[in-house]
Amino acid sequence: MSYRGTDRLAELRLSARQWTCPSCRTRHDRDLNAAENILAAGRAVARGDSSEAASPGSW
């Protein structure tokens, strides 16, 4: 994920389910990202690592 151009994120409405980074042209899908985060949290819980499940940056 590109962090350049993230000032544009503040302008996005929640109804915008997909967006393209203006700097790197990477297409992002909020629903897919949420699903990946939920899956990673579930896997962390299944491993018994509840601290990892609570910290998205550690996935």
Image (tube, helix red, strand yellow):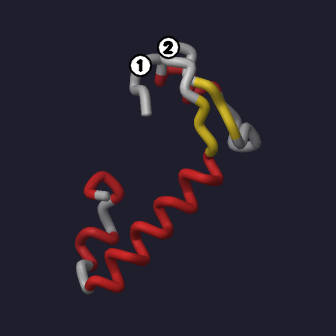
* x and y percentages locating residue 22 in the rendered image: 56, 15
Earlier along the polypeptide chain: callout 2 or callout 1? 1
Marker disc for residue 4: 1
Which residue appears at 26% of the width and 57% of the height?
A: 58
Density class for disc 2 (Cα within 10 Å; few <14, some 14-19, many ≥20) is: few
Q: Quadrant of the N terminus?
A: top left
Left or right: 40, with 8 as reference point = left
CB of mark 2 within 8 Å of CB of mark 1? Answer: yes
In which quadrant of the rendered image does the C terminus lie? bottom left
Q: How many marks?
A: 2
Residue 1 position (above or below residue 57): above
Q: Position of residue 2 (x, y in %)?
A: 42, 27
49 to 19, vertically: above or below: below
Give the residue type at disc 2: Ser
* Residue position for label 2: 23
Q: Taking 51 as reference, is 36 left or right?
A: right
Relative to residue 40, is residue 18 depicted above or below?
A: above
Relative vertical location of residue 2 with respect to residue 15 in this rendering, above or below: above
Q: Residue at x 27, y 78 (%)?
A: 50
**Residue 30 location in percent, x, y?**
61, 47
Looking at the rendering, which quadrant does residue 25 occupy? Answer: top right
Q: Secondary structure at mark 2?
A: loop
In the image as oriented, which residue stretches furthest toward the right?
15
The three-letter code of the residue at mark 1 reads: Arg
Point out residue 12 in the picture as x, y percentages from the top left corner: 65, 31
Q: Residue at x 47, y 61 (%)?
A: 37
Task: Name the quadrant containing residue 21.
Answer: top right
Q: Residues within 10 Å of mark 1 (few under 14, many from 20)?
A: few
Numbered tag placed on residue 50 in the rendering: none
